[in-house]
Image (cartoon, rainbow, N blue to C red):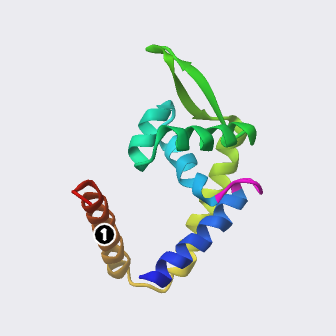
């Protein structure tokens, strides 16, 4: 498990740098979440990732500096902000995602489709169990 996690972290750094040379690997999941859910609020992001609002705010400020995301006033609550990718952020993120998908497809090209499906099921189960464990008294 440690080896899989280490390789994932290494890939995370590489993928983040494909988006922007100055993008920290820890910010890539935040960027991906915003890409999948445009208009998210900072508080929603903090809740989703299980971190404080200040942490998300710092990450978002950096993403704004890099020109990857923009904040707009929430039309439903003028005290809040909605976060979306900039056109450049969309373009850079999509290129990185396409590269990541190609890498995974290449790595699993010789696998039987049932094995790929089983891996996907088990990783999904693992992820759900980690989230559930973290949300319990731990």
Residue found at x 50% / y 16% = 79
Helix, strand or loop for the magenta stretch, by majority: loop
Q: Quadrant of the image for the N terminus?
A: bottom left
Image location of residue 74, percent across then percent down: 50, 19
Image location of residue 138, percent across then percent down: 27, 60
Residue found at x 72% / y 40% = 88
* Residue 45, above or below 104: above
First to last magenta residue range:
19-24
* Residue 74, above or below 68: above
Secondary structure, mark 1, is helix
Residue carrying label 1: 126
Image location of residue 36, percent across then percent down: 48, 43
Residue found at x 46% / y 82% = 2
Image location of residue 86, percent across then percent down: 67, 35
Q: Quadrant of residue 85?
A: top right
16 is within the stretch colored magenta: no
């Amino acid at each position: 498990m440690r080896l899989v996690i280490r390789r994932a972290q290494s890939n995370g750094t590489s993928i983040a740098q494909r988006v922007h040379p100055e993008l920290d690997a820890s910010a890539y999941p935040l960027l991906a979440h915003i890409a999948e859910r445009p208009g998210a609020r900072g508080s929603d992001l903090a809740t989703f990732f299980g971190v404080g609002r200040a942490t998300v705010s710092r990450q978002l400020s950096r993403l704004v500096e890099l020109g990857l995301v923009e904040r707009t006033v929430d039309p439903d609550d003028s005290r809040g902000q909605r976060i979306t990718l900039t056109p450049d952020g969309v373009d850079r993120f999509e290129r990185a995602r396409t590269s990541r998908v190609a890498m995974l497809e290449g790595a699993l090209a010789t696998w039987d489709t049932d094995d790929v499906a089983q891996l996907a099921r088990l990783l999904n189960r693992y992820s759900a169990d980690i989230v559930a464990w973290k949300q319990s008294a731990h």
